[in-house]
Image (spheres, rainbow, N blue to C red):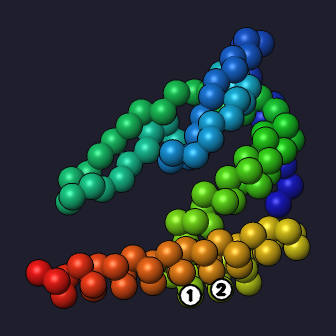
Amino acid sequence: MDVVDLTGWASAVIKAIEISQGFGTGYKVEVREFILVEGDLRHEVWSHNGMRKYHKTPDWATADMAKMSEIMKKSAEEDIGNRTFNLAMNPADIKELASTAELNGEQVKFVKETAIMVNETAEISTVREATAFSHD
């Protein structure tokens, strides 16, 4: 996919904001108010507990897509440990991550070591719980 900058800006003002995905590390990005064009969405819609939710979105976009792309790549690399830990409880997820993600050798090694460590910890916890339960 080609990274393309917007060209229709409403003003020259650029703001720096900090964003994050979930509870991961936040990162700073520069945004700029843009001019809406036909087809632009001004809201997000989703369902939660059977209720339709709606949120109006501001008319601000990433000011420099190439810079944003680099920030996101760096953030993903820094956050891979957290995501791997969350996936490590399910060996099938680890296998899928290793086969579909673009990981370098050190990251693959880290994924495997983390999976082993988490699975061993889970086995120890299960043994402790079973032992504690049998003494009741």
Q: Residues within 10 Å of mark 2 (few under 14, many from 20)?
A: some
Q: Secondary structure at mark 1?
A: helix
Q: Which mark is residue 95?
A: 2
Q: Is residue 28 left or right of residue 54?
A: right
Q: Is residue 105 above or below residue 130?
A: above
Locate residue 7 relative to residue 35 in the image: left or right. right
Look at label 1 and name its amino acid. Answer: Ala
User: How far across and how far down the image is residue 11, in percent?
Assistant: 72, 13
Gap in Å between the C-alphas at discs 1 and 2? 5 Å
- Taking depth in this image into account, of 6 and 122 the one nearest to the observer is 122
Contact, mark 1 vs mark 2 (Cβ under 8 Å):
yes
Q: What residue is shown at x 42% (from left), y 33% (from top)?
A: 56
> Could you classify mark 1 by the number of other residues whose Cα lies within 10 Å: few (under 14), some (14-19), or many (20 or more)?
few
- Residue at image position (88%, 73%) is 105
Dividing the picture into quarters, in which one does residue 80 lie? bottom right
In the picture, the quarter occupied by the N terminus is bottom right
Q: Residue at x 58, y 40 (%)?
A: 20
Give percent across and percent down for residue 67. 85, 37
Q: Is residue 119 left or right of residue 63?
A: left
Q: Is residue 97 among what the camera can see?
A: yes
Residue 92: mark? 1
